[in-house]
Image (cartoon, rainbow, N blue to C red):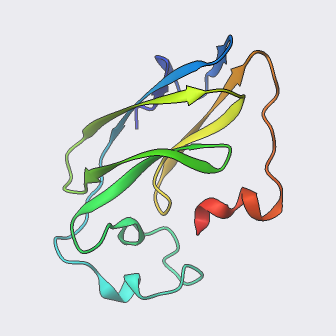
């Protein structure tokens, strides 16, 4: 929730001239039980529930990763406690090319924006690269 890039909200198009840094701000909240749910953790990602937060748990603690994904590749991440309250997380991500970006978790919710650098179009990933973030 409250995902911003260079101060602009989701749905905005960010235009940058030349190489620089995109400042990413996101407020996130997640809630996991103190103990892992092994029944979900042991299932294949092809089995329900597909998008359960339990699948994003780091180890046996209550942390999940918040990631900035640019053109299908995670370029930055930070762990956040999945204890219920809202946590503010910021990133400064180098912007060298036009990108579609997502901030969220590999197995959880995410938000998307488009960043255009020097007016160049967003490049499209092909085949296996486009879904690589699922692994």
Above-or-below relation of 53 to 68: below
Image-quadrant location for residue 12 = top right
Above-or-below relation of 89 to 130: above
Left or right: where 99 falls relative to 41: right
Q: At x 25% / y 57%, what residue is drawn? A: 82
The quadrant of the rendering that contains the N terminus is top left
Count of marks placed on residues: 0
Q: Position of residue 84 (x, y in %)?
A: 21, 52
Left or right: where 48 falls relative to 27: right
Q: At x 46% / y 59%, what residue is drawn? A: 108
Q: Is residue 10 visible?
A: no
Q: Position of residue 95 (x, y in %)?
A: 61, 26
Q: Is residue 128 visible?
A: yes
Q: At x 82% / y 62%, what residue is drawn? A: 127
Above-or-below relation of 5 to 132: above
Q: Position of residue 5 (x, y in %)?
A: 50, 24
Image-quadrant location for residue 71 = top right
The furthest residue to the top: 17
Left or right: where 48 falls relative to 40: right
The furthest residue to the left: 34
In this view, the residue in front, 92 or 60, is 92
Q: Position of residue 39 (x, y in %)?
A: 35, 89
The quadrant of the rendering that contains the C terminus is bottom right
């Amino acid at each position: 929730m409250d995902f911003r890039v260079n101060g602009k909200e989701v749905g905005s198009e960010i235009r940058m001239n030349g190489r620089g840094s995109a400042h990413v701000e996101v407020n996130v909240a997640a809630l996991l039980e103190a103990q892992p749910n092994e029944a979900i953790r042991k299932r294949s990602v092809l089995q329900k529930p597909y998008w359960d937060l339990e699948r994003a748990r780091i180890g046996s603690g209550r942390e999940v990763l918040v990631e900035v994904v640019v053109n299908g590749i995670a370029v930055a991440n930070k762990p956040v406690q999945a204890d219920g309250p809202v946590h503010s997380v910021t990133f400064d991500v180098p912007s060298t090319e036009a990108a579609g970006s997502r901030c969220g978790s590999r197995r959880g919710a995410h938000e998307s924006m488009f960043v255009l650098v020097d007016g160049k179009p967003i490049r499209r990933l092909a085949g296996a690269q486009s879904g690589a973030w699922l692994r």
